[in-house]
Amino acid sequence: MGITRTGGPEVLGLLDLPEPDGDGLVIRVAAAAVNPVDLATRSGLIPTALPAVLGWDLAGTVAHAPAGCGYTAGDRVMAMTAQLGTGVGSMAEYVRFDPEYVVRVPDALDLVDAAALPLAGVTAVQALRRTPVRAGRRVLLVGAQGSLGGQLAVRLLDEPDTTTDLLVRPGDAEACRALRLGRPGGGAVLTDPARVEAKAYDVVVDAGGAPDLIEAVCPGGTFLTLVPFAAPDPARRPDVEFVLHGVELDRADLAEVAARAARDAGVRPRTTVLPFADAHEAHRRLEAGGFRGKFVLVP
């Protein structure tokens, strides 16, 4: 599933490509998730070489494994292909990818759930690694209702010495309150950005695109954004550390995401499954806004 030209969801189509040969690790794709980066690539907002197979996330089974790679045919695996950097899209029946960045799917995790995890999960792990020590600090997470925000929320709420407030849309407040249950971290669920206290937080993590909330960071604090197209001007708050985080391929981080999801259902986003041929519908609904969870496409 990919594009030969950029534009709206209607430019998405099935591409007739040769099946990867037996040189390298070949994965038979069971499911591939749709992420906002796919919409930006399809629209031309992020340039890419054409024609292009879209998609960063996949889960499936090994169809061919070269000797010594650590995998055998039939192994259940997942990967983040980082399409913009590698040129490898995940939305195909078969994907050849570097085994150094592939991990096994735990038995407790089905392949559809596994496909929804890599980009959001690895981004969350790496982003929190870039924030300062949070014990005894006050943190605001913006956009906790999304798939990335949910990954961040679970990790922050499992820190017993951190006070984490979650800023979400009003319709998502109850779901986020439920997510808090049984987790040791303190904090509140907020729904009105205009009522967020100025200069009250040591760390603001923005997964929702709210640049004005840099004003919520106290002097000497950190504003970390995961939304490059809605980042504030760092000059606006020279007394605040500004971090624009971009995800990197990392096998260890992906393995941590898989293990966490296998033991904690709260990490797994709600999935809506569509066939590859309906990818345009997933893109259309995501662009329209209001969708909660993750679209997962299946061959």
Image (cartoon, rainbow, N blue to C red):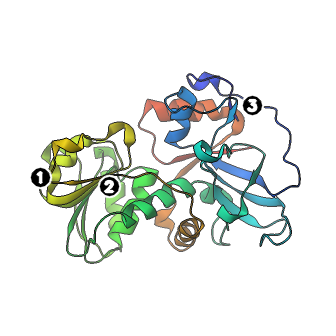
What is the distance, in whole Å, between disc 3 and disc 1 at their CAs? 49 Å
**What label sits on residue 174 in the rendered view?**
2
Residue name at image x 76 percent, y 31 percent: 15
Q: Which residue occupies 26% across, 71% down?
A: 134
Measured as percent of width and height from the top left, residue 63 is found at 84, 58
Residue 258 lies, with reference to residue 244, above or below; the image says below
Amino acid on which disc 3 is placed = Leu
**Nearer to us: label 1 or label 2:** 1
> Would residue 136 be found to the left or right of residue 256 on screen?
left
**Residue that carries the numbered disc 3 in the rendered image:** 14
Q: Dot 3 surroundings within 10 Å: few (below 14), some, or many (20 or more)?
A: some
Residue type (three-letter) at the residue carrying disc 1: Glu
Question: Is residue 82 found left or right of 195 in the rendered image?
Answer: right
Q: Would you identify the image quadrant in which residue 221 lies?
A: bottom left
The disc, 3 or 1, on the residue closer to the chain's N-terminal end is 3
Select label 3 or label 2 by which is in front: 3
Q: Relative to 17, say whether 108 is above or below.
A: below
Q: Residue furthest right?
A: 22
Element under label 1? loop
Q: Under tag 3, what secondary structure?
A: loop
Work out whether residue 151 or residue 109 is closer to the camera in this orientation and state it.
Answer: 151
Q: Please identify the quadrant where the C terminus is shown.
A: top right
Helix or strand or loop: what does disc 2 sit on? helix
Dot 1 or dot 2, earlier in sequence: 2
Q: Tell me the residue at 59%/46% (across/down).
A: 85
Give me the disc on residue 197: 1
Q: Residue 107 appears in which quarter of the rendering?
A: bottom right
At horizontal 52% and vertical 56% (from top left) the residue drawn is 248
Q: What residue type is labelled 2?
A: Glu
